[in-house]
Amino acid sequence: MTEKKLNIEGMTCHHCVKAVEVELEDLGVESYDVQIGLAIVKYDETKISEHDLFKAIDEAGYKIV
């Protein structure tokens, strides 16, 4: 199990948080804690790559910095 702290640019409200949570759920991460501008994600690196995380955040409309 891998844990990553992701700094996310462009989030301004709790709707933004929910959008990121939905994408992470769809991706199948083990667990997450999303706040405005930050996500701490635990995932199985044999099933999900770091690129997958970046893509999920991008699909929510935000950018990892």
Image: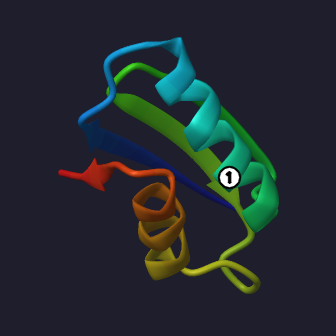
Colour approach in the figure:
rainbow
Which quarter of the image is occupied by the N terminus? bottom right
x then y, percent, for residue 40: 52, 37
Q: Nearer the viewer, residue 18 or 51?
A: 18
Give coordinates of residue 55: x percent, y percent.
46, 72
Above or below residue 6? Residue 51 is: below
Residue name at image x 27 percent, y 53 percent: 63
In the rendered view, tell whether residue 42 sits above or below residue 46.
above
The residue tagged 1 is: 24
30 relative position to 16: left or right: right
Question: Which of the two residues, 11 or 38, is positioned nearer the viewer here?
Answer: 11
Crowd band around label 1 with a 10 angstrom C-alpha radius: few (<14), some (14–19), many (20+): many
* Rendering coords of residue 65 (x, y %): 18, 51
Whether residue 60 sits left or right of residue 7 in the image: it is: right
Residue 8 at x, y percent in the picture: 30, 41
Q: For residue 45, which quarter of the picture?
A: bottom right
- Asked if 40 appears above or below 14 in the picture, the reply is below
Specify whether residue 46 is in view: yes
